[in-house]
Image: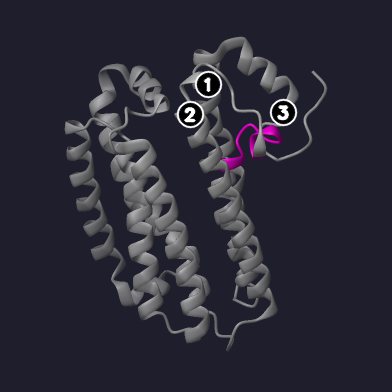
Amino acid sequence: MPLDVFAPLNLWVWLASLSCLFFILWFLHLRVPNASLADVGFCLSLGIIVLACGISAVGDLPRRILISGMGLFYALRLGHFLLTNRVWNKTEDPRYQIIRTRLGQWEGAGMFGYFQLQAPASLFFAGLLCWTMNHPADGVRGWDGLGVMIFLIAIIGEGMADRQLTLFRENPLNKGKTLQTGLWRYSRHPNYFFESLHWWAYVPMAVGLPWGWAAIFWPMLMTISLLWITGVPWAEAQALASRGNDYRDYQRRTNMFFPWFPREA
């Protein structure tokens, strides 16, 4: 992705502005306290950047509207879900509590760094959409249609997984139990799987761009992060700590990430 994609936006001004936004969110999280505000901020900043790119990009207008609409819908849906289910009148996600414990005396600096990291991260991931918006092709192509199909599957799937988990957790009879129905019957983390799939939607839309094959780097990085760094490991550790053998049985039967039929117990 050429950096001149961001030229109309003044990359360094945006980075400084987003850094200020995450400083405010970090300060607010000290009062709440809830580190999931960083995730909400990521969605907010990504949506703002995508909208700005949609306005300032030089690519074909229908494609700019399509891609910026996809990015905005993704950011708004996920941001609203996180705000209402992880932040507003909610206790902090246990995964962040584990992180705080592991940081120990470095908790303050570590959490501040985590919030600030969201600024370049949101710019980086928004960059994929900004890049595809500057495609020289006219009109919406078949490759774009494929990208939209992947996007719809990902957004619908992630929305269903989030909704199923929310309804399960709202039932007090399910406390200490593991959700094993719906999409959660086929994957222990369908929400993360569909989150990863969403970023693959923009790969076919980059076909025809110079170095367009490099678009796979963004979804690969997101998939690696969710599988081994920011997502699955923390969720698995928290689930084992809170549900013990019930979750171990679930692990033996159910694929960790990619949906597939459950194995025999």
Position of 191 compared to 248: left or right?
Answer: left
Position of 155 compared to 113: left or right?
Answer: right
Residue 16: quarter of image: bottom left
Q: For the residues marked 2 and 1, what is the alpha-carbon distance in whole angstroms?
A: 7 Å
Observer able to see residue 134? no
The stretch in magenta equals 183-191
Q: For the residues marked 1 and 3, what is the alpha-carbon distance in whole angstroms?
A: 19 Å
Q: Residues within 10 Å of mark 3 (few under 14, many from 20)?
A: many
Q: Residue furthest top?
A: 245
Position in image of residue 38 (x %, y %) = 32, 42
- The one of 149 and 170 positioned closer to us in this rendering: 170
Asked if marks 2 and 1 touch (Cβ < 8 Å), the reply is yes
Q: Which residue corresponds to mark 3?
A: 254
Position of 72 compared to 233: left or right?
Answer: left
Position of 209 compared to 72: left or right?
Answer: right
Q: Relative to residue 93, is residue 243 depicted above or below?
A: above
Q: Residue at x 60, y 27 (%)?
A: 179
First in residue order: circle 3 vs circle 2: 2
* Kind of residue at disc 1: Asn
Q: Residue at x 47, y 85 (%)?
A: 61
Give the number of the disc on residue 169.
Answer: 2
The verdict on residue 188 being magenta is yes
First in residue order: circle 1 vs circle 3: 1
Q: Which residue corresponds to mark 1?
A: 174
Looking at the rendered image, the disc whose residue lies closer to the viewer, 3 or 2, is 2
Q: For the residues marked 3 and 2, what is the alpha-carbon distance in whole angstroms?
A: 20 Å
Looking at the rendered image, the disc whose residue lies closer to the viewer, 1 or 3, is 1
Q: Residues within 10 Å of mark 1 (few under 14, many from 20)?
A: few
Observer able to see residue 235? yes
